[in-house]
Every structure is written in C-alpha cells, then in structure tokens.
Image: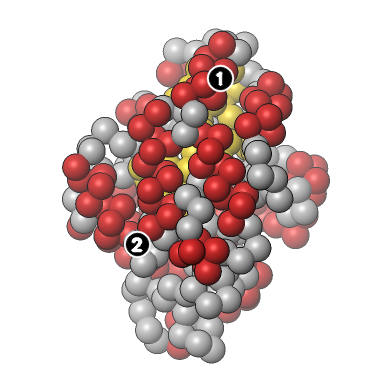
Amino acid sequence: MNEFLKKMGYDAGDKVLITHIDDIGFSHAANVASFECLDVGAASCGSIVTAGPWFQEAAEICRANPLYDVGVHLTLTCEYPTFRWPAVSSREPSSGLLDEQGYLWRTREDAVRHVTVAAAEQEMRAQIQMALDAGLEITHIDTHMGSVVHPKFLPAYLSLANEFGVPAFLPNITRERLAMIDKSDIADGYAEVLEKIDTNRVPTLDEIYIDTLRPLTDKKAFYREIIDKVGPGLNHLLFHPAKMSEELVAIDKERPESRHADYEAWRDPALKQYILDAGIHLIGYRELKQAL
C-alpha cells in the first residue's frame, strides 16, 4: 500500500485521484478555461507557469480566490515556435538556460543537455519565489514537459520541495513502466533517486495518466474511460484546458482543439459526479501538503 496514503487514513483498497490542470498562466485562454474547471470542482487542482506571460492574470485571480489549490509548473522549456518565454533567474548564456534566441529550450532533451544543475536549481527557486512574492499559497510543485524530473535535476527538485514545505509531483514508477512510456533513457537514474525516498514522509504517485493531449474534439468519453481504469492507490490525471480563441490557435497550432476539448470535458460538473459515483476519493495537492 502507498505509505503516505496510509498515514492520511486511507485503506489499501481505496482509489484516490488527483485531477490536475497543467499550463495555467501560459495564455489568457488557459486561464479562462482553467479557473472555470476549478470552479465546478471536476478539476481538483492545477499548476501555474510563473515564467509564462499570463502569470500575473492567474496570480490576481488566485489572490481573489485563495481556496484554489494551485502549485508551480516548473519549466526549463518553452516548446512553441513563435510564442516563447525566457528564464526568470538569468540572461547569462553560461547558465545554459537559454537557446540561441534567448528563450528557454524548445525540447526537454536540449534542456537536459545544456542547462547546468546549479542554473536549474536557481531557476526553479526563482519560479517558486515568483509565486510566493505574488501572494500565492502554493500547494505543490510539478514539471512542464518532464524536464525538471530528469535524473540530472531530480535531486534539486526534491530538495526545493523539502525547502519550501510542499509536495512534488513524483511518480513511484518502475524501470519497466518508464520504458513503456518512452522514458527508458532516464530509468536507471530515476529509480536510483526514488529508492532513497522515505515514502512515509514524501508522497509518491502510484499511477499517472499524462498522455492526454490527443487529437480529439470530444474528450468526455476519453476521460471516463481513464477514470474507469483508476485503481487503488494515489493516482494523478493531468490535462490542459484552454478556451478556443484566435490567441490559442496562434500559440498552439498543433493542438488547440484538444485543449478546448479538455475545457469542455472538465467544466462539466457531471464529470466530477462520475468520479465520485465510481467510488473514487477526489483530492488535490492541498490535502497532501497538509499531511506532510
């Protein structure tokens, strides 16, 4: 059984699910959609790209609604071809944080290759501090495009979670499962770090559902199928809601319909009821933080 859930009072057969919004703050379209999804309660929590250009709008909304369960979506990457954000902590090329255009790297592989560990820790700390300085009570930290949970940066990421007293998105995942989701390149290093974790003190995720940016225009059935698969333990399901607009189409030319479909699915209170009717305990990261 998940030791942290046991500490929280759950039993071995309990199905516990976090429904998590990624990419709040990356656009106005994402902000509009994300907070509407949080308002209906189908989405239990989310994380904000503090380096993103619409962070200040997201922060203002959160200050007016302090019950929102939000964390920091730590990023060393910005994947869009014409919509870019820079590092928060440095403009120095020697840090390795910046590509030839002066922005964060387009791919996780480039970030891992170029960013120094010291610069990554400095950047993550600066992004967390931005949220705190904006008056937000952050409930957790997680990762954009998986960059900061690469074994190269994972110890610094977990150290920052401990320093700021928040849980971190941390899958308790086997080498075999990492290979199945095309992450075999990090399997040994990730498992080595994970073996040192005290799972009674640090929450870890038994199952993650992360491959949800799909070319679907109606995703309600898609998410119900995922919910039907949720098993005992601590599960994390993430998605990327954004409201269809000229802004969204200009930013994400490949997947705007998928993001809008997430918005349509998760703004529907019936999805929350579907989760509860399945006997699933729906929680956010605030509950994990309170149990640290």
Which numbered dot is residue 54?
A: 2
Quarter of the image with the C terminus in it = top left
Quarter of the image with the N terminus in it = top right
Residue 42, how many percent across, how many down? 47, 28
Residue appearing at x 51%, y 46% in the figure: 241
Query: Where 66 sits versus 191, above or below?
Result: above
Residue appearing at x 31%, y 36% in the figure: 68
Question: Residue 280 lies in what quarter of the image?
Answer: top right
Give me the C-alpha separation between circle 1 and circle 2.
31 Å
Kindly tell me whether residue 199 is visible in this rendering. yes
Residue appearing at x 51%, y 53% in the figure: 244
The residue pinned by badge 1 equals 275
Q: Amino acid at mark 1?
A: Ile
Residue 33, how many percent across, how many down? 43, 45
Question: Residue 67 lies in what quarter of the image?
Answer: top left
Residue 213, how many percent across, how many down? 64, 49
> Does 124 sit left or right of 144 as displayed?
left
Mark 2 is surrounded, within 10 Å at the Cα level, by few (under 14), some (14 to 19) or many (20 or more) other residues, namely: some
Q: Amino acid at mark 2?
A: Trp
Front in this rendered view, residue 22 or 248: 248
Say which label, 1 or 2, has the lower sequence index.
2
Residue appearing at x 34%, y 62% in the figure: 54
Query: Where 113 sits versus 160, above or below?
Result: below
Which numbered dot is residue 123?
A: none
Front in this rendered view, residue 80 or 247: 247
> Does 252 sit left or right of 283 as displayed?
right
